[in-house]
Amino acid sequence: VSVFYDDTIGAVQFGNNSNLSFGPSGELFVTDSAEDRIFRLVDLDGNGDANGPLEATVFFDGDPLLNGSGLAMASPASVNIGADHVVWIADTNTNSAGVDGIVRLTDLNFDGDANDVGEAHRIYTPPSGLLVGDSIPSDVIVGADGKLYYVEASSTGFYVKGIYVLDDTNGNDIIDPIAEVTAFFIPPPGALTEFIFTVTQDGAGYFYASDVGNDV
């Protein structure tokens, strides 16, 4: 066991590093739900950590005044990277502000971040995304079929908890919450009930979901 990144040594400071995922080129992307940032960690010198110069950087800053797209990211809950290097974020609002939904980040000019104009886009916003607790997108992945699968962990009952598919069928870069969102898995009453929080898929196509309330 070794420390890959230590924010007392490296270049960026963590507030609440809550989720992480590797990109196809070996970069480690880390969500920070307190700093409202996505960090990118890369072991450039091959010494087993990302504490060196230029190895830890801000891939996306959720402050709309600090990213060229003017997009506000309230509290990133999870990150997933597709084979096309697109970075997907499940974003949740907080008690003070923010919008729930799914954010797409793309480093279009290959400068190592998604802070430039047009590189950040909110592709999905639930109808009640401004209300705290009505929608809690806790995880998102790109499925083997290329569609997005996200976990809805609503705490108010406005949405049924479960895993949903987002499919931009008309190609307009916005997910229609009525026509382009379908339920993929809704736990039956009394079963692995209402605590699904994360989802992943293996190479054979099987999906796995963590039930944090029932510990299965």
Image (cartoon, helix red, strand yellow):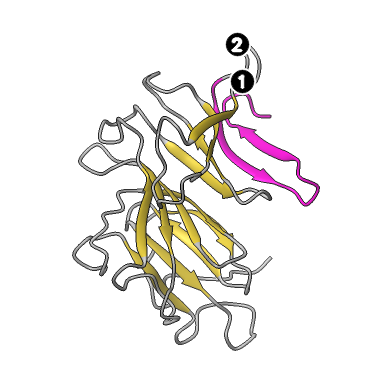
Instruction: Tell me the residue at 38%/31% (across/down).
Output: 135
Question: Quadrant location of the N terminus?
Answer: bottom right
Work out whether 181 lies above or below 37: above
Q: Is residue 4 left or right of residue 10?
A: right
Which residue is identified by label 2?
A: 189
Asked whether the beta carbons under mark 2 and mark 1 sit within 8 Å of each other, the answer is yes
Over which residues does the magenta segment extend?
194-216
Residue 59: numbered disc: none
Work out whether 12 lies above or below 20: below
Residue 27 position in % (x across, y down): 57, 72
* Residue 9 in sight in this render: no
Residue 121 position in % (x across, y down): 35, 57
Residue 212 is one of the magenta-drawn residues: yes
Q: Is residue 201 left or right of residue 195?
A: right
Residue 18 position in % (x across, y down): 47, 51
Instruction: Tell me the residue at 43%/57% (across/down).
Output: 104
Marks 2/1: CA–CA distance: 6 Å
Q: Residue furthest right?
A: 204
Which residue is identified by label 1?
A: 187
Residue 97 is one of the magenta-drawn residues: no
